[in-house]
Image: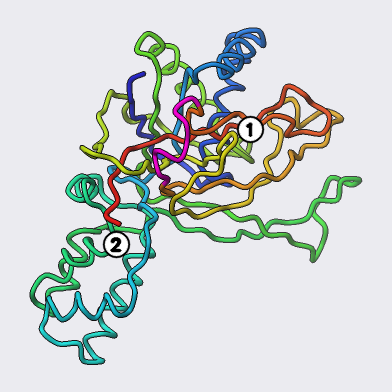
Amino acid sequence: MKCYKVTIRPRSSFITPLDSDTLFGSLCWIIRWKHGEEKLEDFLNQYSNEPPFLISSGIQANCLPFPVTKGISRSRLREIIKDAYGNTNPKTMNKVIRQIKKIKKEKFIPIDVFKDHNNSFSLENLLKTILGNDLNSMENNYKKMFYHKKPFFTVKDRYHNMINRISNSATDGELYTQREITYHDDIDIYLKLPKDDLFFWQNVFEALSYEGYGSKKSSGKGQFSIIDFKRVTLPKADDPSHFMTLSSFIPSEKIPGGYYKIKTKRGKLGSSYSKKKYSPWKEPVIFYEEGSTFKIDSIPESNNYGCLVKNIHHSLDKVVQYAYAFDLEVNLDE
């Protein structure tokens, strides 16, 4: 399979985050509407052998998820600071610790920076690059490495009127809040697919841009334009020890070793399923988050780094949850 990148530009705020499993579900509904249920079932059945299509979560343009790695002990930090500046006085220590906290809060890393460190990636090596030989230039080195004009997104609670379903009018004095995501930059979504299927997926993504994405799309949320759809080559390590996932990930059997963050998610049915008598809720599942890293030899190659989670709805057997890793090889300096 070849790697492609879809760059989208938000035209409204979003209610639903651009997680890989939700993106996959939205694309599946487009396939069903445009090509019929039989085409969708044939597509999903292929995952019982080799995945015919992989998708990442939405990532800040020209960036990758910040890899999750081991931290730095305080004793090792003292050694690093002494090597860089020749002293470990409290003022210097505190300033460097604050810098480490900033680095660890980064959700994304520019692709160029990742490429420069991919063959020996660690929080320690990043810190050494930022520290340089001059304490006064440390902040400038950090800004050059992780420069963003604006935060990638902001989240705010919006107040809305409660609607009386009997009178179909607003209820006086009753409000509810809804969390909205406003993206301030373009968004990259990575795909792996056979070259012969490129035209098919271009049409599917174009249809999704017309339809809108996620909750409240009928009222104008989740609107975006497709800026680019092109073949790309992601930076891979020469001698990888781990892979990093660019998507939400659940292993099919063995729990792999590595460094990771987790999140619990309870998905909802979409489109026509959400309007029928069924409960809209799927069963809750625990995902490894984007940026989590796993030892390559801890998962058999036949595992394909993930699965379609079945039996995810209590009454609909055909409903599945996408949980494949969009893997990118990296060598962690442990």
In screen coordinates, is 33 left or right of 224? Answer: right
Residue at 76 percent across and 40 percent down: it is 281
Q: Quadrant of residue 313?
A: top right
Horizontal and vertical percent for residue 30?
A: 57, 20
| Residue for badge 2 | 123
Residue at 18 percent across and 67 percent down: it is 128
| Residue for badge 1 | 321
> Which residue is situated farthest in the right direction here?
166
- Tally of marks: 2
226 in relation to 165, above or below:
above
Q: Amino acid at mark 2?
A: Leu
Label for residue 198? none
333 in relation to 82, above or below:
above
Q: CA distance from mark 2 to mark 1?
A: 33 Å
123 in relation to 248, above or below:
below
Q: Amino acid at mark 1?
A: Gln
In screen coordinates, is 145 left or right of 30? Answer: left
Q: Residues within 10 Å of mark 2 (few under 14, many from 20)?
A: some
Horizontal and vertical percent for residue 141?
A: 16, 66
In screen coordinates, is 120 left or right of 214? Answer: left
Residue at 54 percent across and 29 percent down: it is 24
Horizontal and vertical percent for residue 113?
A: 21, 51
Front residue of this view, candidates 296 and 14: 296
Q: Secondary structure at mark 1?
A: strand
